[in-house]
Amino acid sequence: MQAEIISIGTELTSGAKLDTNSQWLSLELSGIGIPVRFHSTMSDDRAPMLEVMRTAVERSDIVLVTGGLGPTLDDLTRELIAELTGTDLVLHDLSLRIIEEMFAKRGRVMPERNRIQAMFPRGSEVLANPIGTAPGIWFAVPRAGRSPCLLAAMPGVPSEMKRMYRDQVLPRLPHGSQVIRRATVHTFGQGESAVEEMLGDLTARDRNPEVGITASSATITLRIAAAGSSMQECDRMVEEARRIIRQKLGDLVYGEGSDTLEGAVLTLLADRGLTLSSVEFGGTRGLLAQQLAASPLSDRVVRGSLVVSDSAGLNTVFGSAPGDIPVSRESAVLMARTCRERFQTDFALAIAPFTQPAEGEVAECFLAMAHPSGVDAAEHRILSDLSIARPRAVKTALDLLRRNLMK
């Protein structure tokens, strides 16, 4: 048994929006032992849509479609399912009443065009949508000489799709004979190839559990996938892989699952009743302050974050004499020490100015962490793409603090 996922919308193929539905659905299906073999993303174009749907139904046992169930002329999913199955669209009175009531609750009259959302291919089942105006479609599509293909069409809006999948689609799906359990472990401080070398044969092909490596903005994530006959068996394999990863990588590991580096740092500080402040000059554009502020622990730990764009602003805030702030280790140390004193915190992080390199050259900046015993500084160097340099500089500063807290 295998599944296929189809995402519909010109906004996806044009790059205006990212298709996160396919990723989410793939993980959900793997949780019930159904592997996903194909992803297709297409624009709102009738002929290619019909061709992709027809191919999917022939080669896959389960086909999940997201998008194209709205009321506008480019929403073609229901019409194409009817054409694919050789049926016509029929009105579902209950769905129409529900849609009308939704508009009434908002104090609006339902446009006549929304009536199409209550039309369904004859022989299909309605998938209720309690939080939107687009019901879904469930259809067991006949196939000559084989069992039917189970096709579900759901809204493209992620919140509506997830609710419909869990409440309406999942109970209708068969479960595979093999259970798949997944986990992720996040590391920082070494590159992808260095981490793989440290792990040895743990990342070898055809191993169960499979351990894959993904790199994003200097964070290396290890993806663990265990396949077995029971949840308990898979959980044991995942836990053993976790143990080996932590044993081999040590303090390079900062978290798992949805953990972030800033979240790991603030948790360490909060658990010890310690406080933090930060200052950034120009290059990172306030990214450190933004990430700290986004954490739920920020109010407990962070007393203040300064973001300045030039030397005059920095000198004004710190009350020192105006003058240029050079790209140097001394600048970072001075910024961190002054920030800690200004906010009266246990720790302070500082990111000093970036150099502005020519293409192909190296950008350089210095980072510092002030603490009760003094100031630690580090150099941050990266090729000239500042969109990469900024998040890496922020993570390097956070990791400087994390390692100090783990001593």
Image (spheres, rainbow, N blue to C red):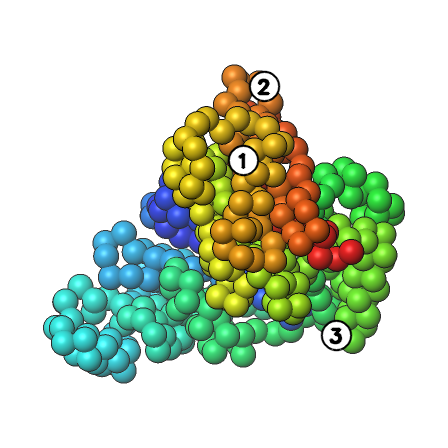
Viewed as shown, does residue 141 lie left or right of 383? Answer: left
Q: Nearer the viewer, mark 2 or mark 3?
A: 2
Task: State the CA–CA distance, disc 2 to disc 3.
Answer: 51 Å
Residue situated in front as seen by the camera: 91 or 363? 363
Q: Earlier in the sequence, mark 1 or mark 3?
A: 3
Location of the N terminus by quadrant is bottom right
Q: Give the residue number, with chain letter if any, for mark 3.
A: 231
Instruction: Say what amino acid the circle numbered 3 marks.
Output: Met
Q: Which mark is residue 361?
A: 2
Residue situated in front as seen by the camera: 297 or 320? 320
Q: Give the residue number, with chain letter if any, for mark 1.
A: 352
Q: Nearer the viewer, mark 1 or mark 2?
A: 1
Location of the C terminus by quadrant is bottom right
> What is the x, y in percent for residue 312?
39, 33
Q: Earlier in the sequence, mark 1 or mark 2?
A: 1
Q: Residue at x 49, y 29 (%)?
A: 325
Q: Residue at x 51, y 60 (%)?
A: 302
Instruction: Say what amino acid the circle numbered 2 marks.
Output: Glu
Task: State the CA–CA distance, disc 1 to disc 2.
Answer: 19 Å
Residue 309 drawn above or below residue 133: above
> What is the x, y in percent for residue 77?
35, 58
